[in-house]
Amino acid sequence: MTSLRSQAPAFPAHDMSPRVLLGPGPDMVHPRVMAAMSAPLLGHLDPDFLALMDRTQHLLRYVFQTENRLTLPVSGTGSAGMEAAIASLVEPDDPVLVCVNGYFGSRIAEMARRHGGHVDTIERAWGEVFSADEVREALQRRPARVVAIVHAETSTGALQPLEDIVQVVHEHDALLIVDAVTSLAGVPLRVDELGLDVVYSGTQKCLSCPPGLSPVSFSERALEKLAARRTPVPNWYLDLSLIMKYWEGNSRVYHHTAPINMIYALYQALALILEEGLDSVYQRHAEAHASLVHGLADLGLEMLVDEPYRLPMLNTVVIPQGVDDVSLRSRLLTEYKIEMGGGLGPLSGRVWRIGLMGHTARSENVERILLALGELLRT
Amino acid sequence: MTSLRSQAPAFPAHDMSPRVLLGPGPDMVHPRVMAAMSAPLLGHLDPDFLALMDRTQHLLRYVFQTENRLTLPVSGTGSAGMEAAIASLVEPDDPVLVCVNGYFGSRIAEMARRHGGHVDTIERAWGEVFSADEVREALQRRPARVVAIVHAETSTGALQPLEDIVQVVHEHDALLIVDAVTSLAGVPLRVDELGLDVVYSGTQKCLSCPPGLSPVSFSERALEKLAARRTPVPNWYLDLSLIMKYWEGNSRVYHHTAPINMIYALYQALALILEEGLDSVYQRHAEAHASLVHGLADLGLEMLVDEPYRLPMLNTVVIPQGVDDVSLRSRLLTEYKIEMGGGLGPLSGRVWRIGLMGHTARSENVERILLALGELLRT
């Protein structure tokens, strides 16, 4: 075991210089969130911890702008929230419509198929968004019980308007699942006002928390569908009907051991958003985005997405002809300690993805990446 | 939002005095693990993070005592590892045998049913263990492709011998899944020497890490069964055939955003075990257990489980007649700041569960709980 021993230095000795994280997430975390995360552990049934769970739910309802009873963080990263949503609402042979205009739309479709759904998809090019008419036509062609769409496509930088689409979905007596992994707390997402049925997110985007939890919120209609299932959810770990019994009421039925420290971190991250105020947080994202786009234009760089549909927290920049994607991002990381994302799927090698999420959406970070890109593109 | 604001003080201001965690987990965490957890975030595709993942896998193979290629932490708590194991190996209509002698055996059976398995169970009273003959008879009565058993039943404190059972399972051409959530790094568990097919654990027991990850290890035979599935795993988030592609090789296909800081913590916790040496760690657990049992006997308290089958890290103590379970544990927590577990299911109100796990398995903690119990039982 001597060779193994030499591979295991104490963690802080491992050579890690801090990064400026301007990729698709995780982003940088407020020092108070880090401090909260390393507070001493409580048991998962300790009265103090149960009180903290209640408070975390209150704060989650604030950022989701909802009164939904089932509003809680699932114990996994954003994809666990996606799977909890699909596993809860899609039963074998259920007709499902998934709107696919990027990587995460495809993932939803894949999950819905694995859960036995009869999945129909409509598609738009990566970087574009759907109109309500397209969704209406699809539902007229083939009815669905569940429709899923991505609010903020992290793979493309496109912001999907939801107002008209949710109306169409409800007119066709279906439920709407919305992927808000990247949008929550970065752009307005008023869950109750819009009437969304299921929304899920992740902690490592605009909530500025480490990855590890996925906040979800279910409307009463979605809960009714969950309660009326013909078969049990084929996923015990993510069965929200069981998880709810631990998160609410006085009985607190043990389900699984909650990731205690991650919930400390989430609570503190949410408290910081409340302190600043959601509208100010949205405003800060919008300003950082505007100043980034302005600076990129000065460098001669173009955005992939048309102006009205650009995500402020995830900016897709077209890579100029003749520039080597991988080597530029590698130099950015090693020489400037700045992480920027590459493109996924059909956008691989075609775009960069610059994240300005949560705590990270500040002018100093915009200046950092503009300066670095300016230098690297000149050399 | 003023009322909400008053509910969201900054986290460290929340009144939380540190607990002595002597329940069924989480237990107390080494300060170096806490420090590692709050190190600055790296991106989940950062070369430094990928190197840390490799090192974490090396260390996990050491604590599992295995060369298994698929040895990695699943991004969820222990039950996520359980579900990853079941979802991978149990296909609809597969005959499955589950050995149930406590809460976690029942949970495995429940999961296997949800995944469409034809589940047969054999049962022993809570606190007892299975003989190889019982497993043989069950497999002769009805063959199974998969057998599942709990190594350390956290609900009862019983340690299940595995040597003979794994032979019987393999003679009947089935695969053995072992729940090692509480046993890993607390009692010897030599995965390759025993020939176990699938083993899963949790970070918040004898690894002395916060809850949030579930280390799993799959033998080549288990991987072959996974590769030969007739249907895709009906759980995208826990599909190990996808997760493997992120954890190994040079391609590093993105699956989901790894819980970065939890992996920092796990790495450091494993490095501490390597530093101390597995045999010394086992020895420390055995000594703490012996001194606890001795002290409990002096207080006139009896153990639930027969001596040869007692878990050192999870001690079930019979509650004396006339003692109020809930009020004693509540006083222990509020007056002494010591958490001790209550009984689950049929043992509710009948036993206490005293954990001495990982970093927590030390004489000072044994003395603390013996002193406190002595005082509380006198008053």
Image (spheres, coloured by chain):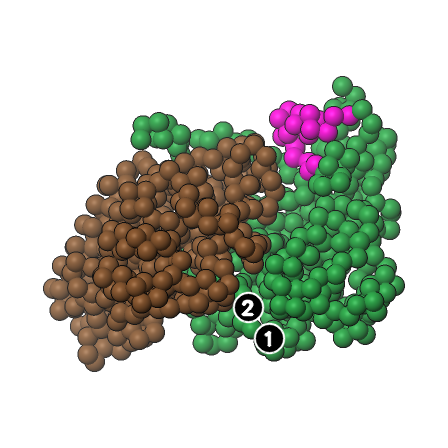
Chain colours: A green, B brown
Q: How crowded is mark 2: few (under 14 residues within 10 Å), some or many (20 or more)?
A: many
**SS under mark 1:** loop
The mark found on residue B131 in the picture is none
Task: Give me the chain letter of mark 1.
Answer: A
- What is the three-letter code of the residue carrying label 2? Val
Horizontal relation, residue B272 to residue A337: left or right = left
Q: Considering depth in this image, is B101 or A40 the residue closer to the camera? A: B101
- What is the three-letter code of the residue carrying label 1? Arg
Q: Which residue was labeled with disc 2? A: A233
- Image spot of residue A359 (x, y percent): 66, 47
Determine contact: label 2, label 1, CB under 8 Å: yes
Q: Which of the image's four quarters has the N terminus of chain A?
A: top left
- Image spot of residue A356 (x, y percent): 71, 44
Name the magenta segment's main secondary structure. Answer: helix
State yes or no: residue A329 in magenta: yes
Q: Is residue B14 visible?
A: no
Q: Which residue is drawn at 24% across and 67% down?
A: B127
Q: Which residue was labeled with disc 1? A: A229
Horizontal relation, residue A374 to residue B230: left or right = right
Q: Identify the residue at the far top of this view.
A: A379
**SS under mark 2:** loop
Q: Which of the image's four quarters has the C terminus of chain A?
A: top right
Q: What span is in magenta?
A: A323-342
Horizontal relation, residue B250 to residue A354: left or right = left
Indicate whether B114 appears above or below B83: below
Q: Residue at x 20, y 59 (%)?
A: B309
State yes or no: residue B100 in magenta: no
Task: Give me the chain letter of mark 2.
Answer: A
Indicate whether A103 appears above or below A196: above
Q: Considering depth in this image, is A135 or B40 the residue closer to the camera? A: A135
Q: Which residue is drawn at 67% across and 66% down?
A: A198
Q: Considering depth in this image, is A55 or B163 the residue closer to the camera? A: B163
